[in-house]
Amino acid sequence: MALALLPAVFAASFAMAQAGADRAGADKRRSGYQDMGVALQKMQDDDTANPGMLFVQLGQQLWAKPAGANNKACADCHSLADMKGVAARYPAMSKDGDKPIDLEGRIRLCRTVNQQAEPLATESRELLSLAAFVANQSRGLPITPPADPRLAPFREQGAAIYERRQGQLNLSCAICHDDNAGKKLAGVTIPEAHPTGYPLYRLEWQALGSLKRRLRNCLIGIRAEAYPYDAVEYVALEIYLMDRARGMVFESPGVRP
Amino acid sequence: MRAGLLTAVLVVSIAGTAWSQGASPSYTVVGDAIPKPLADKPGDAARGRAIVANRSVGLCLLCHSGPIPEERFQGTLAPSFAGAGGRWSVAQLRLRIVDGSRLNPDTIMPPYYRTTGLQRVAKPFEGKTILTAEQIEDVVAYLATLKE
């Protein structure tokens, strides 16, 4: 009885699960969660304190709300159980297209094609809330990118962008997030670039934001030309980053400084 | 007044065009140093300190730390400025700021006075150096004062 309970107790808290993994020495990768202070970790862990949960709740309402010419809600086609694990495996190839899409892209496509509703703007409150609600169904699951060979060239493209120096400051993602992860950039710990908690609430933003927004922040920081919002480059980077984070615990909605 | 303003705008835009089309501003490297100042005016250490401390102008404290106690959040990616003026000569400091990649191609130090060989630079910064010649002389003058 006590033995049977033990795994459940460990799984109950992400922090404890991570501590368990650390003790086992099995995985040296660190989520940004582990690099932030205890106060922020508690904020993320407590659903009544995590600001991202407000978006999850709004997303839950939108999920059930009919929209568009077909007057259908997300819930009319998708069962919530089917959403479990979806965010932990995206981006994926779009059903009809030849390009991969991320979770926000999938929701936007569903919105215009299936619901025949007004498109949801990138980084809009509605889109982020729906994404947060869907992502929340995967909280606690391991990140599991699909074994789709069509994703491979995009993953390679993402890796190449990650390694490439850009911008007036002539820096690459890898220089900071691989070679210097754990060190302080202007007093802030540089994370290992594992997208474990998106969409997530950043205190710096005072808002929920997507991984794409985070990538744009970095590009602007190194004074590189940010890709347009619909650029495949972001999705390629997301595919690469999710692949590096394979097996790590999916946390959305994360909280970060 | 109006004509004067127009002339100023024209000069700025012509200079900008020439810069973005041409090579990086010129200087002569001797050994691991740039012996000749980049600007006519000698560097001002007090102005240099202000540039170093300003995280949107010099950007230095994002990666480095230094004896600037009023700036609490400093970086640990690169060496402290403490003692920089004892470790390096003015001419050596100048090259390390202008283009450290000439000494170490893998350096993470951004090239503060180079406009070529950069990829996908954001439009507002295209063809511009991170600091001007005068600003680099100011920073060099400040770092040279940090003997220990």
Image: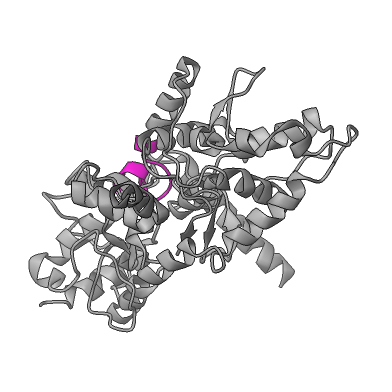
Residue at image position (24%, 70%) is B65
Q: Is residue B94 above or below residue A119?
A: below
Q: Is residue B131 above or below residue A230?
A: below
Q: Is residue A5 above or below residue A202?
A: above
Q: Is residue A32 above or below residue A85?
A: below
Q: Pick out the residue farthest to the front.
A: A1
The quadrant in which the N terminus of chain B is found is: bottom right
The quadrant in which the C terminus of chain B is found is: bottom left
**Tally of numbered tags:** 0
Q: Position of residue A227 (x, y in %)?
A: 56, 39
A186 or A178: nearer the eye? A178
Residue A3, magenta (yes or no): no
Query: In which quadrant of the rendered view does residue B144 lie?
Result: bottom left
The segment highlighted magenta reads A162-175
Main SS type for the magenta part? Answer: loop
A1 or A11: nearer the eye? A1
Q: Position of residue A9 (x, y in %)?
A: 36, 54
Residue at image position (11%, 77%) is B147
Left or right, A85 with respect to A196, comes to right
Residue A144 visible? The answer is yes
Q: How is the image coloured?
A: one colour
B60 or A71: nearer the eye? A71
Q: Position of residue A135 (x, y in %)?
A: 57, 44
Residue B108 visible? The answer is no
B54 or A248: nearer the eye? A248
Left or right, A84 with respect to A140, comes to right
Q: Pick out the residue farthest to the bottom.
A: B70
Residue at image position (54%, 59%) is A201
Q: Position of residue A24 (x, y in %)?
A: 20, 46
